Image (cartoon, rainbow, N blue to C red):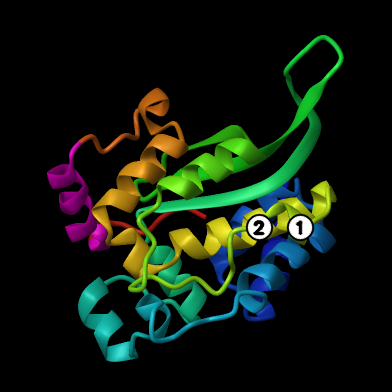
Amino acid sequence: MQSLNDLDYFVGLGYDKQLTKQALKLTNGNKNEALNILKKTIDTLTINKEDIQWRSKKDEDWLSYNDNHVLPKDLETRALVRSPIYALVTSFNPSGKQISNYKFETTFLIHITLKDGRNWYINKTYNEFFLFYSTLPIGSTITLTNHFPIPNLFHKDESKRCKLLADWLRELVLNESCMSNEMLLDSLYSFIDADSYGGRVSTMKSQQIVLNKLSSSLPIF
């Protein structure tokens, strides 16, 4: 359980309160691990400001957009507030999926959180990640600074592969151009098994309604 002192400590360092609560929850109150998550959240993403407009909005834009909501202090949090889906690759399991009597395939644990606060965990193999990646309509108008990891980038190092997948997926869901692309959203909802957890936005029209109402509530992170 997280203590009030732990929360106050991180908030005192300038970290967002909601992000801090989530980091402490994910790490069962381990301050060092929570700090690593918070540092990664704020520091490790390379920001392409021309493409990731959510992270470059001016204060007056956000005050108008969010009405009476508290204005997030850092640009990373502002992207979190507006994204309809947040997905975090948290760990990997070398024996996660049995494919024969003596052979197992590594799975990667993903924590999914929707805009309305619903959340769940799913396990995906690298092949399932790649299948999802291959369906994305990413072209010249959508550019990610974290490229999808191909095998020669990690040389069977599952820890490195996990980090590369985490960085890529995180940037994808925090990218305004990606999250405004209806075809991409449709593929993403399928990938995160939203149908199974009651979070599926089943039609393009419904997806646009969700995007038009992003300011209705703050996500729980």
Amino acid type of the residue that numbered disc 2 sits on in the rendered structure: Pro
Q: Secondary structure at mark 2?
A: loop
x then y, percent, for residue 158 = 81, 47
58 to 148, vertically: above or below: below
Image position, residue 130 (x, y; %): 56, 44
- 175 relative position to 88: left or right: left
Residue at 27 percent of width and 90 percent of height:
60
- Point out the residue furthest to the top here: 101
Which label sits on residue 184?
none
Q: Which residues fall within the magenta stretch? A: 203-215
Q: Is residue 109 visible?
A: yes
15 left or right of 119 in image? right
Q: Going 59% across and 51% down the picture, which residue do you hit?
A: 88
Q: Residues within 10 Å of mark 2 (few under 14, many from 20)?
A: some
Q: Which residue is mark 1?
A: 152
Residue at image position (61%, 35%) is 124
Place of residue 46 in the rendered image (x, y in percent of width and height, measured from the top left):
59, 79
- Point out the image quarter for the N terminus: top right
Q: Looking at the picture, tell me which residue is in the foreground, 79 or 182.
A: 182
Residue holding disc 2: 149
Residue sitting at x 36%, y 50%: 115
**25 or 150, which lies in front?**
150
Farthest-out residue, front: 152
Amino acid carrying mark 1 in the image: Asn
Q: Residues within 10 Å of mark 1 (few under 14, many from 20)?
A: few
